Amino acid sequence: MNKVLALLPAAIVLVASIFVKAFAERYEVLGAAYAPLLNAGVLLRAFGMFASVVLVWGLLRSRGASRGVLALAILSGPIAYGITAAIDALAYFPAGQAAYYGINPIAIATVAGQCAAAAASEIVWRWWSRRRGQDVGSPVTWGIVAAIGAGLMTVFFTVLYQGGVPFFYVYQRGYMLLFT
Amino acid sequence: MPVAGPPSQPSRRAFLAGLAGAVGAVGLTACSEQTGGRPVAVPVSENAGGDHPNLVVIVSDDHRADHVSYHPDHPAFLSTPNIDRLAQQGMVANNAFVTTALCSPSRGTFLSGQYASRHGVQNNLTAWNPDTETFFEPLMAAGYDCAFIGKWHMPGKLPDLRGVDTFITFTAEEGQGQYVDCPLLINGEMVDRPGTYITEDLTDLALEWINNRPPGKPYALWLAHKAVHHRFIPPENRRGALADADLSNLPPESFAFLSLMDENIWEGTLGNLQTLYRRYNETLLGLDDQVGRILDDVDLDDTYVIYTSDNGYSWGEHVLTGKRWAYEENTRVPFVAAGPGIEPGTTDAMILNADVAPTLLEWAGVQGLTQAQGTSVAGVLAGGDAVRDEFMYEYFPDYPYHVPGMQAVRDDQWLYVEYDRGRDPQLFDIVADPRTQNDVAASNPDVTADMAARLQRLRDQVAAGGVV
């Protein structure tokens, strides 16, 4: 059951991706619901990629999930994105380049985002557990704070700072080194 | 700020330019033989605008063709009175296109008159070949003062651009530049520009250069703006100007966060579509203001002025933001030309970015640029007949953008596109379906076959270096 829970972020990414792909441009089918549904779809997908671990972290911790399962919960959304993105990229680029697409700046940011989200969820879970009388340690530790800070900073520098342009060029240079 | 001065060291080019000018001054024509493999310009005494009219080309970035207020389908909220002023005084080309709808390849085509597959800047990653001849060379050899001011943005080392006295550009953000405080490379020297807004700053420099020209000596100015490329930052006096604009002109397939789709995510347009679109148009208002300053300063009796863009831009059409595709929103560009002998009017003749360089040379009465594949449209802009009834479009994959390589042929009714990586070709009836929503290849096999044959013919022609 824990493994299934840990795969929920991946499921969100996959379902939202399929929905968006299926209905983008189908405004005549969806009518007035087109824009709201498509917006919801892409935002849900982004949530699945960047922060959906918050949905399952507390449950997994309460259920005594192993470190491996917790890591799966953090990584399943990003991995789902990376794999689907690489498969999509096959329509445009050869296999090696498509695989490189799977580790693009957004993929890196999703891992960082999920780490930060997991750390924030850990604070909430510890606080909630302590209120229930459980000894789970201090809700706020340097390690947790560092994880949140490092995660958010990575997200910031990979996709937000100057619209993600500087890091994009770093990624492109990697492409040039590898493939040209 | 040293803008108008000559390069720090007298060069062979400068010597040749001076020599050519001297030759022109005594009314002789230079010889047409080739020196070192390069054509030598031949000043021609007769042309529409007098012996040597001035030439000014203003090239914006990502400015789509219907976003000028002279266009019948322009957004109701958009007013570009200065570009309109040029349109009222000159010829508006209703069917102006680029042969590759992407910054670097299109710029290479403007300068060289060649297709991207020939000049070699096929995408934003392939380098400019410094041996490529541009229209500046024959102009300088004929005695013109020449300046390149603005966006270069072609991969590779910045060239020692032959044929220009003044070369001002920027290297920030891989050559994309930045709207505010953008450092400029002015004749080889990097100069910080604190407190500046780039469109205004480049215009200041262009005006300073124009106004420092020696009397009686013709000049050619290439002014390439960053605007209105992303990140769509308008000048302060235009920020919020369109906050209340009715954006119902955005296409029905668009939605606010389509920028989060993989197809769009690298376009630098993360965020709400409406917000970005407002900023795009506010940036465009700022650009129009600066175009007006140039127009105020030049005399159309002895100066040809072209306003155009490197490519169009999708704002939600086909659920896309950006350019690159063979769709109308991407390939069409605004194009207005005014100057001696050009009567106000409009033309439906097809004009390409590849035509600009040969046209400038014809206006100048200068021969050269033997590798150009475009055709002078000086006659078209003076009210003459079209020079073509079809053109080839090409796009080369540009990692990591989700756009397939493609080649297309477009005439007055049909757009036929062939894609790489096994995608089926598409055929669009542009007359019946101007938004290219319906692929009608399957239901029009004869047209499809004919267009495929025409594309192959054009492809061969372009590959052979032929004029198209």
Image: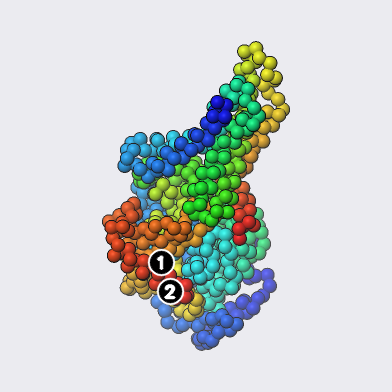
Q: Is residue B359 left or right of residue B175?
A: left
Taking B371 as reference, is B75 above or below it? Answer: above
Which residue has dot 2 on it? B461
> Along the line of sight, which residue is nearer the eye, B307 or B428?
B428
Expressed as whole percent of the image width and height from the top left, the position of residue B435 reads 34, 53
One can see residue A141 in this view: yes
Q: What is the crowding at mark 1: few (fewer than 14 residues within 10 Å), some, or many (at least 20)?
A: many
| Chain that bears disc 1 | B
Comparing B403 with A69, the one in front is: A69
- On the image, numbered disc 1 is attached to which residue? B392
- Do the CB atoms of the residues marked 1 and 2 lie less than 8 Å apart? yes
Judged from the image, the secondary structure of the residue bearing numbered disc 2 is helix
Asked whether A141 or B199 is in front, the reply is A141
Colour pattern: rainbow
In this rendering, the answer to whether B221 lies above or below B293 is below
Q: Is residue B202 left or right of residue A16?
A: right
Task: Name the amino acid type tagged 2.
Answer: Gln
Please, what secondary structure does the residue beneath circle 1 have?
Answer: strand
Kind of residue sitting beneath label 1: Met
**Residue B292 vertical placement versus B350 (above, below):** above
Q: Whole-percent x and y of residue A4?
A: 54, 29
Q: Quadrant of residue B136?
A: bottom right
Neighbor class of circle 2 (other Cα within 10 Å; few <14, some 14-19, many 20+) is some
Report the chain holding disc 2.
B
Residue B215 visible in the displayed image: no
Task: Same chain for labels 1 and 2? Say yes or no.
Answer: yes
Q: Earlier in the sequence, mark 1 or mark 2?
A: 1
Quadrant including the C terminus of chain A: bottom right
At a point 50% along the width and 83% down the height, the residue shown is B42
* Relative horizontal placement of residue B48, taking residue B234 as reference (left or right): left
Q: CA distance from mark 1 to mark 2?
A: 10 Å
